[in-house]
Amino acid sequence: MLTLLLRQAGAAFRMLVVATVVLGLAYPLAVWAIARLPGLDRPAEGSLLAAPDGTTPNQVWAGSSLIGIDPVPADPAADPWFHTRPSASAQDVLGPGNPSTSGGSNLGGFSDKLLDQIQQRRALIAAREGVAPDHVPPDAVTASGSGVDPQISPAYAQLQVPRVARVTGLPVAEVQHLVILATDPRPLGFLGDPEVNITRLNLAVGGQRAAVSGSGRECESCPSGRCCSAPLRGSAAPAESRAEQAARPPDAWALLTLPEVSPLPDSAGRPMQQP
């Protein structure tokens, strides 16, 4: 009887050692090593988007391409940012939401509260964008399941293009091109719908604003007074004339490189810093 107990205890101990080595050491190390492979390291670290901090060669995290942060403009009457979908974590009906909290509202299609929220959001967005309420797309007035989705429909992005172009002083065509660059196609070419990543898009808009402002040149074609045709990196190259701009091939924008960009503000209006 004692021999049987010792044999069973020995087998259990050996199993404990093997499981500890395989599952507690070998497996985590293998997963960590695979996550360091080229092409997998960025998603494994959270798909972070980096931007220079403006004072040192080090970088600060501007956000994640997987998390949508609805920027808070310093002046709501001059809002230069694209906005995400509403969030159930927001205190106000339109946001901004709390990116540290994920979840939906759990309200059904027959909920009077949900229908009232949709009507309020539609009216607020229509007033912000200067359009009729029936022009507001459905994803603009309905919260996502997580509340922190960074994607919106191309229709909602296009709805915001005129306002962003007006406030930033960038040409409408240039803002539309930035939207195209931030648009992800259908997965596998046929699943779902194209989506515009707002985090990447706002970083690109912020970079373009910085490049135009850094050029230090003036023109009369922009509401901001800055030259719309400034080089993307703020170089001293001469501005193109209207005739040269009209003669530029439509696909020439694809040859241009976006500048490094500044961090987006969080829901409280502060830049996101690397811990």
Image: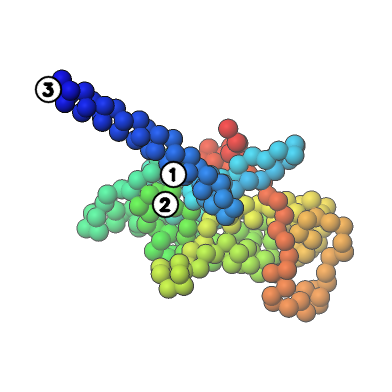
Tag shown at residue 167: none
Residue lying at the far left in this picture: please name it: 1
Tag 1 residue: 97
Identify the amino acid type marked 1: Gly
Front disc: 2 or 3 = 3
Tag 3 residue: 1
Mark 1 surroundings: few (<14), some (14-19) or many (≥20) residues within 10 A: many
- Quadrant occupied by the C terminus: top right
60 sits to left or right of 102: right
Secondary structure under tag 3 reads loop
Mark 2 surroundings: few (<14), some (14-19) or many (≥20) residues within 10 A: many
Tag 2 residue: 86
Residue for point 48% across, 64% down: 195
Q: Position of residue 91 (x, y in %)?
A: 39, 41
Q: Mark 1 touching mark 2, by CB under 8 A?
A: yes
Residue for point 87% across, 61% down: 237
Q: Is residue 171 visible?
A: yes
Residue for point 37% across, 57% down: 142
Q: Position of residue 29 (x, y in %)?
A: 48, 39
Dot 3 or dot 1: first in sequence order is 3
